[in-house]
């Protein structure tokens, strides 16, 4: 068993989620950031890859005091569990994700992670070991389910999202398309990695809903075939 897995990602009109320098850029506006805060608050956990932690240093906290209060009134922690997928335990011990906001953090590492890194991270987070060289995502999701996570939001980046699609581990994709062009053949996209080669392997999607926000467009896609 695994949680319901949905991805939320903001991309430019030309399909980029950052610049070629992999610098954090603002693609969403205030309306979309409010929506993102809401769907975060509705999730049990929120997960990113180590590339996003190193590039953006996100906290992944719920920003609205009202949404945090609503979670507490429902008997939950103020913030969803924050999870980093990080084979070698490279998450800096002063990263915002380990310090900002109350509640539980998980760093998922592989068996190849150096022991001293695992010990350092274990002072700030629960450490889950899954996989030999890279994190075994299916095993991680099974363990998260065992720990009570039913709704998991994935916020990026493109490398982690690609592997989740490749392994058929995604149920829904929410794409906000901002009204700008970023360009650059080396700028990251919502699903990077190696990509599928054969049409029969492509992940097939169906539109669940659309909404105009911040001069851009939100598209919610359901996964037909993972
Ligand atoms: N616009 C938006 O909404 C968002 C944009 N971004 C942007 O995305 C970029 C970062 O994306 P990216 O560099 O692709 O990094 P990711 O956040 O996708 O992290 C990828 C890393 O995760 C680790 N990992 C461990 N196990 C796995 C696995 N099984 N499958 C995949 N990855 C695994 C790998 O590092 P290791 O081998 O060391 O474990 C891998 O390199 C930044 O530029 C950031 O600004 C990020 C989030 C949202
Ligand atoms: N929805 C969305 N729109 C953008 O324009 C973005 N740049 C991002 N980035 C994601 O948000 C994370 C920041 O989280 P915190 O505010 O620090 O909690 C960042 O790491 C990306 O995952 N998202």
Image (spheres, rainbow, N blue to C red):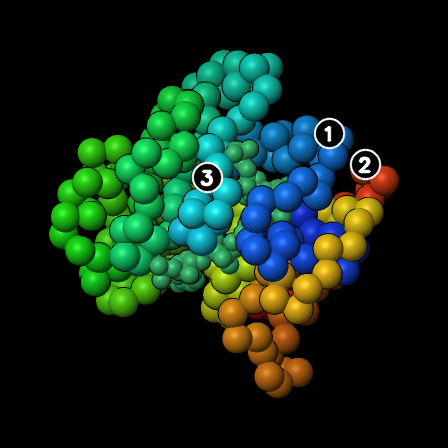
For disc 2, the marked residue is: 214
Q: CA distance from mark 3 to mark 2?
A: 24 Å
Q: Position of residue 183 (x, y in %)?
A: 73, 61
C-alpha gap between disc 2 and disc 1: 7 Å
- Ligand 2 under 8 Å from disc 1 Cβ: no
| Residue extending furthest toward the bottom | 198
Marks 3/1: CA–CA distance: 20 Å
Depth order, front residue of 99/70 = 99
Looking at the rendered structure, the secondary structure element under dot 1 is helix
* Residue 123 image-quadrant placement: top left
Query: At 52% from the left edge and 69% from the top edge, which residue is drawn?
Result: 193
The earlier-in-sequence mark between 3 and 1 is: 1
Compared to 190, does 199 lie above or below?
below
Say which of 158 and 3 sits in front.
158
Q: Position of residue 140 (x, y in %)?
A: 34, 54
x then y, percent, for residue 168: 52, 66
Q: Which residue shows up at 25% across the image and 44% down it?
A: 127
- Counting residues from the start of the chain, the first of labels 3 and 2 encountered is 3
Label 3 beta carbon less than 8 Å to ligand 2: yes
Q: Which residue is the site of mark 3?
A: 57
- Tell whether 218 sits left or right of 202: right
What label sits on residue 130 in the rendered view?
A: none
At a point 62% along the width and 85% down the height, the residue shown is 198
Q: Is residue 30 above or below residue 131?
A: above
Label 2 close to label 1 by CB (< 8 Å): yes
Q: Which residue is mark 1?
A: 30
Are there few (<14), some (14-19), or many (20+) residues within 10 Å of tag 1?
few
Whether residue 121 is situated above or below residue 73 in the rendered picture? below
Q: Nearer the viewer, mark 3 or mark 2?
A: 3
Position of residue 12 measured from the top left corner of the image (x, y, whole percent):
74, 52
Q: Are marks 3 and 1 in contact (CB under 8 Å)?
A: no
């Amino acid at each position: 068993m695994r949680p319901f897995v949905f991805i939320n990602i903001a991309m430019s009109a030309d399909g980029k989620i950052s610049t070629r320098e992999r610098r954090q850029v603002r693609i969403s506006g205030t309306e979309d950031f409010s929506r993102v805060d809401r769907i975060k608050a509705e999730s049990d956990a929120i997960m990113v890859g180590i590339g996003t932690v190193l590039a953006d240093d996100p906290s992944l906290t719920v920003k609205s005091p009202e949404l945090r209060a609503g979670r507490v009134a429902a008997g939950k922690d103020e913030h969803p569990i924050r999870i980093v997928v990080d084979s070698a335990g490279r998450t800096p011990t002063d990263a915002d994700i380990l310090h900002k906001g109350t509640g539980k953090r998980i760093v998922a590492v592989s068996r190849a992670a150096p022991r001293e890194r695992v010990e350092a991270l274990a002072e700030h987070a629960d450490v889950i070991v899954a996989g030999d060289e890279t994190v075994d995502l299916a095993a991680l999701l099974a363990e998260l389910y065992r720990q009570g996570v039913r709704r998991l939001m994935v916020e990026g980046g493109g490398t982690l999202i690609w592997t989740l699609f490749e392994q058929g581990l995604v149920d829904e994709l929410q794409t906000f398309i901002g009204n700008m062009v970023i360009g650059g053949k080396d700028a990251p996209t919502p699903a990077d990695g190696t990509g599928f080669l054969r049409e029969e392997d492509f992940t097939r999607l169906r539109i669940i809903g659309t909404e105009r926000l911040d001069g851009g467009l939100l598209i919610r896609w359901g996964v037909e075939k993972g």
